[in-house]
Image (tube, rainbow, N blue to C red):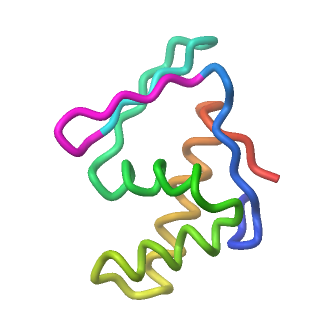
């Protein structure tokens, strides 16, 4: 289970396509599609900029009107969902 000190890496076999502010992810190995809303899409983009989930959470709190605890809770749930679909690796 991910924590705010975890690091997230996008798996090599995942394609990302953004369409009108939302994103679709495709796991080429399993064929699973995963959709992201605009905030989820921004989080996905932040994975490339920040190594640690706490940094991603801080960026989201800065960019959006959201409480830190709510942001952290939602971020960790999203990361767990992405990991279950083998879209990211968490260390």
Residue 15: x %, y % from top left = 49, 23
Q: In the rendered view, does 4 fall on the left or right side of 71?
A: right
Q: Does residue 21 belong to the magenta stretch?
A: yes
Dominant secondary structure of the residues highlighted in magenta in the image:
strand
Q: In the rendered view, does 68 fall on the left or right side of 65?
A: right
What is the count of numbered marks? 0
Q: Is residue 74 above or below residue 24?
A: below
Residue 20: x %, y % from top left = 17, 39
Magenta residues, start to end? 14-22
Task: Assign the N terminus to one quadrant of the image.
Answer: bottom right
Q: In this view, does 87 lie above or below 89?
A: above
Q: In which quarter of the image is residue 71?
A: bottom left
Residue occupying image coordinates x 48% and y 48%:
44
Q: Which of 48/78 is in front?
A: 48
Q: Quadrant of residue 39?
A: bottom left
Q: Residue at the right extreme?
A: 91
Q: Is residue 49 above or below residue 35?
A: below
Residue occupying image coordinates x 42% and y 72%:
60
Residue occupying image coordinates x 39% and y 82%:
62
Q: In this view, does 16 lie above or below 32?
A: below
Residue 66: x %, y % from top left = 34, 82
Residue 72: x %, y % from top left = 53, 75
Residue occupying image coordinates x 70% and y 65%:
52
Q: Residue at the left extreme?
A: 20
């Amino acid at each position: 289970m991910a924590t705010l000190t975890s690091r997230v890496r996008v798996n090599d076999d995942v394609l990302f396509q953004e369409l009108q502010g939302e994103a679709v992810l495709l796991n080429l190995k399993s064929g699973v599609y995963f959709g992201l809303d605009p905030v989820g899409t921004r989080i996905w983009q932040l994975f490339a900029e920040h190594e640690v989930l706490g940094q991603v959470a801080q960026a989201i709190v800065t960019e959006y009107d959201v409480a830190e605890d709510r942001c952290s809770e939602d971020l960790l749930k999203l990361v767990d969902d992405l990991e279950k679909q083998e879209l990211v690796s968490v260390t």
